[in-house]
Image: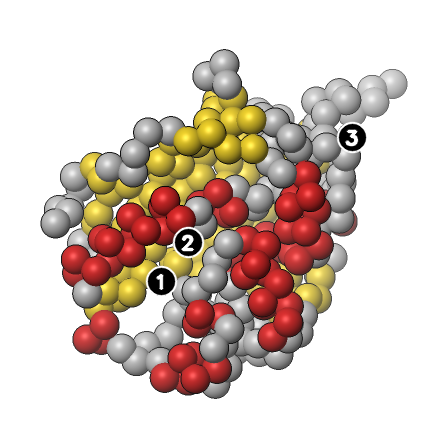
Amino acid sequence: MSGAAALPQVGERLPPLEIGPFDAQALARYSEVSGDDNPLHLDDALAQSIGFAAPPVHGMKLLAAFEALLRSWRGDLAIASLGGTFVQPLLRGEKATLTGRVLRVSQEDGVFVRLYAHGPGRAPAIIADATLRPRSPGSEGP
Amino acid sequence: MTSEGAPIDFGPPMEVVVDAALAQRFARETGVPPEGDAAPIAYPAIWLAQSRLRDRIAQICAETDALPVHESQRFAYEAPLRLGVRYLLAVAARRETKPSRLVLDATLSDVQGGAVGRFETVLRLVSRADLPGKGHA
């Protein structure tokens, strides 16, 4: 009997993950940790001056959160890539729901998953994708 | 001035390390549970925000009177990123027009030169004359 985990099926949906809302302190902490000190994320007046009702959440903070979604779904697979396009800002105080669906599966190329982060707007905040592969024995990475 | 397609100098490769304490804080702020000695997938965002890179980006933006808006980001790995390990990060960049963009292509290798990862950052350069507008920053 093989110890290898079965790969997911094409079309399988990941259990959604709700994140946020993020307050000013959360954005300040992320700025400090990441080194992204763009004042747009922290300064209400600056955000309003370019048309936002509140400062936008760092796109990278949201993109990084997909790792939690992927690992809670299939922690036995390693994430080989994660990328996304920032479509529409999520603003401070707003929640987002992370979702995903398996689009392709192969032994050679791994598992390709389409990912979305949806805030309150009609358009997604992020359209992303990830590739996962079975872990090497004893490995925690790709 | 930078011109379309021409490589933009971001200096020699720099030595970077995954700081365990910083990785733990980064994971906490992005909702990622700890996992042994593996670093969060998006941890290199910290390296990409270093002042050496940001200052060069700011210089390029100033040349065109533009603001950088983070349009997309990609992290791809050949090998897992480990806590406490030293790596070399090489950054190359190029300008695109129509629309105006700055594309950073960062390559991470181990100290023996083995490929570890590749990270692409796309910044849309928004003319200040076109503000107010909306987008991620």
Q: Measuring 32% from the left and 77% from the top, which residue is drawn there?
A: B133
- Give the residue at x 36% y 51%: B54
As drawn, the label of residue A2 is none
Nearest to the eye among marks 2 and 1: give it. Answer: 1
Residue A79 spot, x, y in % from top left: 63, 38
Three-letter amino acid code of the residue under disc 1 = Val
**Element type at mark 1:** strand
CA distance separating discs 1 and 3: 41 Å
Task: Kindly identify which chain the residue marked by label 3 belongs to.
Answer: A
Above or below — where is B57 with respect to B108? below
Q: Residue tagged by mark 3?
A: A5
> Residue flagged by tag 2: what amino acid is it?
Ser
Q: Label 1 crowding class (10 Å Cα cut-off): few <14, some 14-19, many 20+? A: some
Task: Report, in whole angstroms, how far the alpha carbon at label 2 lies from the one at label 3.
Answer: 32 Å
Whether residue A105 is visible to the viewer of this picture, yes or no, is no
Q: Which residue is mark 2?
A: B72
Q: Local crowd at mark 2 within 10 Å, few (<14), some, or many (≥20)?
A: many
Question: Residue B76 at x, y = what percent?
Answer: 50, 36
Looking at the rendered structure, the secondary structure element under dot 2 is: strand
Structural distance between the alpha carbons of marks 2 and 1: 9 Å
Q: Is B131 positioned to the left or the right of A119 in the image?
A: left
Q: Chain of mark 2?
A: B
Where does the image place residue A6, in percent across and percent down from the top left?
A: 76, 32
Callout 3: SS: loop
Read off the residue under disc 1: B69
Residue at screen point 44% across, 47% down: B50
